[in-house]
Image: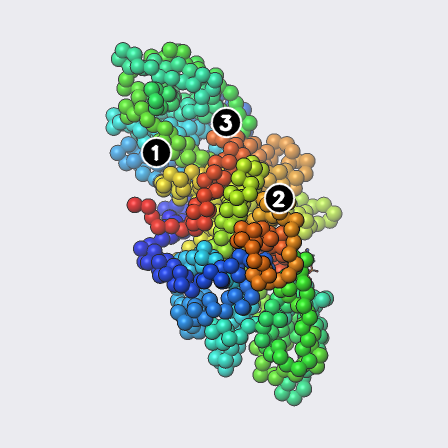
């Protein structure tokens, strides 16, 4: 047993570094650093996406026949870690990481051929239309209705908390096509163009000051039946399959380590002699090390052809908490500086200060925004209930 | 990169668990804890027969050449059974420092006897008041000073003693019956035994200095790290036993007409315990796999594990007691034993806070903080 990477992997790492040296620009890096929301605006990330696509690296996790890289688990770890270290932009995962696996499993060949390359190339931006005002954790209670009309569905209802709907051209949505039988058995999975007549998008600004999510209203929106994924009333299978990717999915260690490293630098600059801050930093560092070991043990299990088992379900739960706590300590570290507030967004356009002063203005918004980590993608409470079954058999 | 346990590890673990399940239940632990000696010589002989007492020693020293992973696998099972026999003092600390520093003849004299179960060791490291000093005298050395919290010293035949000499530090082999050596034994919270020792003009031959080495500081630190690694695996065993015992108990205890395990608030608390167990295990593995690596990384992983597992142990044992109700506050069930074991773990070889401070001083270098745990092997 060991934590060593092989000479081939070191060569791979050097190749990744060489690529990132030119693909990640200073402007991008500044954009990433001054983003206090979860994902970067396409304005920041698109050039990086294009460069990745040109290199054949835009969708590493996909199977090779759909454009994936065929990297080993260790290579994916290296790639993610290096991207994070370089401060490369974060993409909205709705298309690449959530919809794509659903299309690969449940989509028709023509749907796969049309949509997947557009996702890989960064041409399509997708939003996730699951939650509704009355359907949060209890997703199956959703009410947005799709009624059959010839070759089309007519969609009426409302989605909410829809991340980047205002930056997307398409949305995948769960809609109700039947109210008979079990609630889960009347749900259908639809792909909808966001410029369809009858769709209204209204912004919701979070208390961290960012406009990241929205309300999306559907008023007699006509959607061709050919845009359905899977069978009518079988959308719950797609929905559940997608959640596996939303909740488990990618490796987090690299991203969180990059966030932690920024905290370490912030502490050095602002509270180098505060013993309480040092202890909290150390506690978080040990949490991070342990979680990274869990990430790696999952990689190792996958690499040797096994199944990581229930431990993979605790990863989302704990990473979300660690990220929140790092953001919280960063805010605490800068003392009264955390009082200063700039409301205009995006900060990378609004601010024109020395970099270290700009960074201070991101801490409180990030703290506030990051409270959401333990709410979306299956709240801590929902995850914990799932874990009580999968890990403890209760 | 490979974090999969292989067949040999599984055999070692399963064999140890099977033997201990039949030989060392909670009542046995309690009896030994309450006995005057604090250990059982028959059990010790069986450990020797199982090959455990020479596990980390080299073949030529009468051992079987196991590494940190094998030690950790065994230690976790010892923790699950609350084994009180002085395994860490004898094999990891005493045996460890002799392996690392001893001349071939010193190793031959000591290690095969340890592996055969005929010699128990302790390693006196931490000074108490007056540090132990070694002065050259005709034909050898004279040692004076005091040490505290010497694990396993009351049952040790030979005590290894670190002593300041000139600008450096050496380690001396001191038979327990040596004149001028006073051992003041006491019981620890978990039933384990330790002693404070005092040395007044203790004369030793020059062959008593391990490896004739007067700058053993770094090797002593490595040996302490190996002991913390072993005790961490022991603590992970205790934590996982607490989680399992609590889940079992709440499945059978009925209140309000249903098993306690049906209440969401208790389910969530038990998931919290289980998550802490998994993180403790991961942290322990990081330390274990860093023991043979570069010094900085070892120090970071060991201090990190000590702090992380210490915190996990405290939280899990508190939850275990709470979820057992009144019975959890007694010695009736094993959770009382595990709780005390974990208190001992936290307090030995530096408190949680001390290790957090050490960890903080290493991690506050951004180059260290930003590097992932997978790394190119050091040449
Ligand atoms: C930043 C952000 C981005 C989002 N982006 C999207 C998106 O792009 N697309 C989309 O469809 N949705 C999105 N969401 C919505 C997200 O999926 C929901 O917030 C989530 O499912 C929780 O639903 P809710 O907010 O209605 O809370 P509720 O379900 O009302 O829960 C409120 C509280 O009660 C707890 N609770 C609920 N049920 C139980 C139970 N059975 N046992 C114990 N506790 C329980 C919850 O854990 C929570 O603490 C986003 C949310 C956020 C915050």
Residue A317 in percent (x, y) is at 58, 54
Q: Is residue A345 above or below residue B134?
A: below
Residue linked to disc 1: B54
Q: Are marks 1 and 3 in contact (CB under 8 Å)?
A: no
**Label 2 lies in what chain?**
A
Which colour style is shown?
rainbow
Residue at the extreme right of the image, as rendered = B256
Which residue is label 2 attached to? A335
Query: Residue B192 location, x and y as percent?
Result: 50, 27
Which residue appears at 32% of the width and 31% of the height? B100
The residue that label 3 is drawn on is B192
Q: Cα distance, mark 1 to mark 3?
A: 21 Å
Q: Is residue A178 visible?
A: no
Q: Using the image as rendered, state which of residue A259 and residue A186 is in the foreground.
A: A259
CB under 8 Å between discs 2 and 1: no
Confirm whether residue A89 shows in the render: yes
**Image quadrant where residue B342 sits:** top right
Kindly indicate whether the residues beneath marks 2 and 1 are on one polypeptide chain: no
Picture residue at 30% right of the left edge, 19% below the top: B208
Q: What percent of the width, then of the height, locates residue B232? A: 47, 38
Please tell me if label 1 and label 3 are on a single chain.
yes
Residue at screen point 59% across, 67% down = A240
Q: Is residue B279 left or right of residue B115?
A: right
Disc 1, SS: helix
Front of the two marks 2 and 3? 2
């Amino acid at each position: 047993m060991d934590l060593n990477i092989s000479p081939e992997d070191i060569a791979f790492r050097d190749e990744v570094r060489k690529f990132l040296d030119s693909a990640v620009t200073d402007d991008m890096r500044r954009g990433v650093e001054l983003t206090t929301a979860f994902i970067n605006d396409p304005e920041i990330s698109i050039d990086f996406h294009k460069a990745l696509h040109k290199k054949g690296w835009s969708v590493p996790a996909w199977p090779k026949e759909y454009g994936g890289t065929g990297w080993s688990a260790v290579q994916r770890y290296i790639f993610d870690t290096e991207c994070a270290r370089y401060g490369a932009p974060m993409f909205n995962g709705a298309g690449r990481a959530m919809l794509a696996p659903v299309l690969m499993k449940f989509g028709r060949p023509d749907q796969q051929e049309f949509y997947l390359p557009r996702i890989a190339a960064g041409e399509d931006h997708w939003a996730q239309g699951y939650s509704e005002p009355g359907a949060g954790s209890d997703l199956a209670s959703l009410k947005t209705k799709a009624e059959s009309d010839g070759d089309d569905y007519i969609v009426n209802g409302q989605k909410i908390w829809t991340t980047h709907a205002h930056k997307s051209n398409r949305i995948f949505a769960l809609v109700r096509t039947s109210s008979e039988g079990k609630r889960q058995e009347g749900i259908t999975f639809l792909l909808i163009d966001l410029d369809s007549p009858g769709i209204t998008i209204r912004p919701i600004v979070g208390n961290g000051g960012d406009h990241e999510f929205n309300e999306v209203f559907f008023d007699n929106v006509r959607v061709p039946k050919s845009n359905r994924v899977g069978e009518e009333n079988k959308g719950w299978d797609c929905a559940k399959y997608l959640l596996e990717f939303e909740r488990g999915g990618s490796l987090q260690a690299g991203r969180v380590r990059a966030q932690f490293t920024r905290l370490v630098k912030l502490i050095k600059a602002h509270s180098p002699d505060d013993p309480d801050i040092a202890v909290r930093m150390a506690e978080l560092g040990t949490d991070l090390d342990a979680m990274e070991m869990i990430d790696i043990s999952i990689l190792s299990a996958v690499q040797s052809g096994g199944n990581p088992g229930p431990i993979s379900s605790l990863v989302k739960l704990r990473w979300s908490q660690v990220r929140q706590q790092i953001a919280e300590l960063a805010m605490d570290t800068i003392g009264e500086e955390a009082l200063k507030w700039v409301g205009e967004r995006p900060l990378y356009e609004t601010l024109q200060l020395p970099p270290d002063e700009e960074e201070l203005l991101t801490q409180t918004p990030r703290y506030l925004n990051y409270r959401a980590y333990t709410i979306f993608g299956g709240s801590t409470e929902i995850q914990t209930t799932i874990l009580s079954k999968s890990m403890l058999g209760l | 990169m490979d974090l999969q346990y292989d067949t040999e590890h599984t055999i070692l673990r399963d064999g140890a668990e099977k033997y201990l399940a039949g030989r060392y239940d909670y009542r046995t632990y309690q009896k030994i804890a309450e006995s005057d000696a604090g250990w059982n010589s028959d059990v010790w002989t069986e450990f020797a027969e199982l090959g455990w007492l020479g596990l980390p020693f080299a073949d030529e020293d009468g051992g079987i050449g196991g590494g940190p992973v094998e030690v950790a696998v065994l230690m976790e099972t010892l923790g699950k059974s609350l084994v009180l026999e002085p395994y860490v003092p004898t094999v990891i600390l005493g045996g460890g420092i002799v392996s690392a520093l001893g001349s071939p003849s010193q190793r031959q004299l000591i290690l095969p006897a340890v592996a055969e179960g005929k010699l128990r060791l302790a390693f006196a490291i931490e000074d108490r008041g007056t540090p132990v000093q070694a002065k050259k005298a005709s034909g050898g050395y004279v040692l004076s000073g005091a040490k505290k919290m010497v694990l396993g010293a009351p049952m040790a035949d030979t005590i290894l003693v670190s002593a300041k000499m000139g600008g450096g530090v050496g380690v001396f082999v001191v038979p327990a019956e040596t004149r001028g050596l006073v051992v003041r034994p006491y019981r620890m919270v978990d039933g384990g035994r330790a002693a404070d020792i005092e040395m007044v003009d203790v004369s030793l031959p020059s062959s008593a200095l391990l490896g004739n080495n007067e700058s053993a500081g770094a090797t002593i630190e490595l040996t302490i790290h190996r002991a913390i690694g072993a005790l961490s695996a022991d603590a992970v065993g205790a934590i996982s036993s607490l989680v399992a015992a609590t889940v079992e108990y709440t499945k059978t205890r009925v209140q309000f007409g249903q098993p306690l395990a049906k209440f969401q608030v208790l389910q969530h608390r038990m998931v919290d315990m289980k998550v802490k167990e998994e993180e403790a295990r991961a942290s322990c593995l990081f330390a274990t796999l860093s023991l043979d690596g570069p010094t900085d990384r070892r120090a970071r992983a060991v201090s990190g594990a000590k702090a992380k597992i210490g915190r996990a142990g405290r939280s899990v044992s508190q939850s275990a007691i709470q979820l057992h109700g009144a019975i959890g506050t007694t010695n009736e069930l094993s959770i009382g034993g595990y709780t005390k074991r974990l208190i001992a773990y936290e307090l030995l070889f530096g408190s949680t806070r001390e290790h957090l401070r050490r960890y903080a001083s290493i991690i506050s270098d951004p180059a260290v903080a930003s590097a992932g745990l997978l790394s190119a092997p050091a040449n």
